[in-house]
Image (spheres, rainbow, N blue to C red):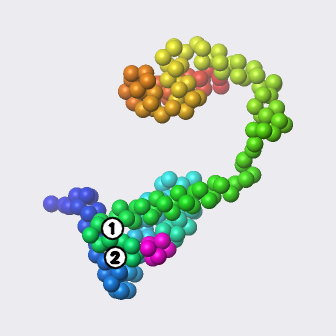
């Protein structure tokens, strides 16, 4: 009988936990084994949620440095994997926060009258807005409300489902179909 994935993950976590405890005791081989084993795991966890996959290596290195610096804070009576995931999530968030906050070229102030005039209240685009409004007005009331709440007002599918008395999947389907209808209608 093949071991299940859950058993494999549990045993992997236990192996990492044992290496971490041994590394805390000064075992350099266990320390090296731990870092070599968790590096690909960290990279795989991180890469899926990044706009640029090249960032995964940078974040992985930051996580490994954090593990090195804080290994002495790991408590051997607690599972290793959640401790590691907390570091992974913190380092990823920290990296993304620094990256996006440094992008001053992509920021603009809404106090800038010139920007507002050319991008927000641009008269030549008023016709497009009227087309969108008329396309929305042609939708059935419930369908329009679902679409407006999710896509315009920014509510989550769960919030819209609660408000409208629908299932979350029905809300998602409705919003998707409405977007497709509007795209066909507006070109």
Please count the marks in the image: 2
In the image, residue 28 above or below residue 55: below
Q: Residue at x 51, y 32 (%)?
A: 155
In the image, residue 134 above or below residue 29: above
Q: Between 163 and 144, which is closer to the camera in this rendering?
A: 163
Alpha carbon distance from label 1 to label 2: 8 Å
Contact check, label 1 and label 2, Cβ < 8 Å: yes
Helix or strand or loop: what does disc 2 sit on?
helix
Res 34 → quadrant? bottom left
Residue 173 is covered by the magenta coloring: no
Q: Residue at x 52, y 71 (%)?
A: 61
Q: Between 181 and 30, which is closer to the camera in this rendering?
A: 30
In the image, residue 156 above or below residue 130: below
Question: Position of 83 compared to 136: left or right?
Answer: left
- The circle drawn on residue 80 is 1
Q: Which residues are magenta?
A: 64-70
Res 36 → quadrant? bottom left
How many C-alpha atoms fall within 10 Å of the one at disc 1: few (<14), some, or many (≥20)?
many
* Secondary structure, magenta segment, majority class: helix
Q: Residue at x 40, y 81 (%)?
A: 32
How many C-alpha atoms fall within 10 Å of the one at disc 2: few (<14), some, or many (≥20)?
many
Q: Residue furthest right?
A: 114
Percent x, y of residue 51: 57, 53
Percent x, y of residue 139: 55, 15
Percent x, y of residue 157: 45, 32
Res 15 → quadrant? bottom left
Task: Tell me if residue 177 can be seen.
Answer: no
Q: Which residue is mark 2?
A: 20
């Amino acid at each position: 009988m093949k071991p299940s994935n859950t058993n494999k993950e549990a045993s992997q976590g236990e192996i990492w936990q044992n290496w971490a405890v041994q590394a805390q005791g000064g075992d350099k081989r266990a320390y090296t084994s731990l870092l070599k084993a968790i590096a690909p795991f960290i990279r795989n966890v991180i890469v899926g949620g990044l706009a640029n996959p090249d960032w995964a290596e940078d974040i992985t290195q930051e996580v490994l440095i954090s593990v090195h610096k804080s290994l002495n804070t790991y408590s051997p009576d607690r599972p290793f994997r959640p401790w590691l995931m907390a570091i992974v999530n913190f380092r990823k968030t920290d990296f993304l926060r620094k990256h996006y906050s440094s992008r001053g070229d992509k920021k603009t102030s809404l106090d800038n009258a010139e920007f507002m005039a050319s991008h927000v209240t641009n008269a030549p685009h008023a016709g497009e807005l009227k087309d969108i409004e008329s396309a929305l007005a042609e939708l059935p009331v419930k369908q329009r409300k679902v679409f407006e709440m999710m896509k315009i007002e920014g509510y989550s599918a769960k919030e819209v489902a609660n408000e409208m008395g629908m299932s979350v999947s029905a809300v998602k389907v409705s919003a998707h179909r409405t977007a497709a209808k509007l795209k066909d209608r507006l070109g």
